[in-house]
Image: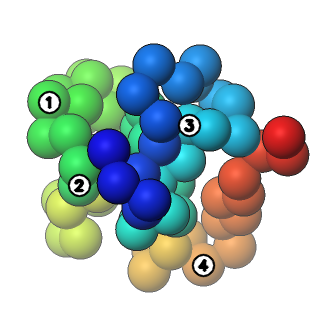
């Protein structure tokens, strides 16, 4: 884990659970961890056009706010 990625073992949803490279929680970053994709697809939260969760797709959902939790 580099400066751009969340700390190993960080609690999901915490300040340290953050992928700065992709501006989403590290625990939900499908671009860093492709093994997460199946779970998003299983819950119908997938944008096939852009290859990321619909809940993170700012191209399709420009009003979505994904913010890093405070410390």
Q: Tag 1: Cα neighbours inside 10 Å, few (<14), some, or many (≥20)? A: few
Residue beneath disc 3: 17
Q: Secondary structure at mark 4?
A: loop
Q: Position of residue 57 (x, y in %)?
A: 43, 65
The quadrant in which the C terminus is found is top right
Taking the spot 59% from the left edge, 19% from the top edge, the residue there is 11
State which tag comes first along the sequence, 4 or 2.
2
Q: Where 64 sits versus 70, above or below?
A: below
Q: Where 53 sits versus 51, above or below?
A: above
Residue beneath disc 1: 35
- Decide if residue 52 is on the left or right side of residue 24: left
Disc 1 vs disc 4: Cβ atoms closer than 8 Å? no
Residue beneath disc 2: 31
Q: How far apart are the alpha carbons under marks 4 and 2?
A: 19 Å
Q: Tag 2: Cα neighbours inside 10 Å, few (<14), some, or many (≥20)? A: some
State which tag comes first along the sequence, 2 or 3.
3
Q: Secondary structure at mark 2?
A: loop
Q: Position of residue 56 (x, y in %)?
A: 47, 57
Q: How far apart are the alpha carbons under marks 2 and 1?
A: 10 Å
Residue 50 visible in this rendered orientation of the protein: yes
Q: Secondary structure at mark 1?
A: helix
Disc 2 vs disc 1: Cβ atoms closer than 8 Å? no
Q: Where 66 sits versus 30, above or below?
A: below
Q: Nearer the viewer, residue 61 or 17?
A: 17
Residue beneath disc 4: 62
Location of residue 9 by image quarter: top left
Disc 3 vs disc 4: Cβ atoms closer than 8 Å? no
Taking the spot 60% from the left edge, 78% from the top edge, the residue there is 62
Residue 53 visible in this rendered orientation of the protein: no
Nearer to us: label 4 or label 2: 2
């Amino acid at each position: 884990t580099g400066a751009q990625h969340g700390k190993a073992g960080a609690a999901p949803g915490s300040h340290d659970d953050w992928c700065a490279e992709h501006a989403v929680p590290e625990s939900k970053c499908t671009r860093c961890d492709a093994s997460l994709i199946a779970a998003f697809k299983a819950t119908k939260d997938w944008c096939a056009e852009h290859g990321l969760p619909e809940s993170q797709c700012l191209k399709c959902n420009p009003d979505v706010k994904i913010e890093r939790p405070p410390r």
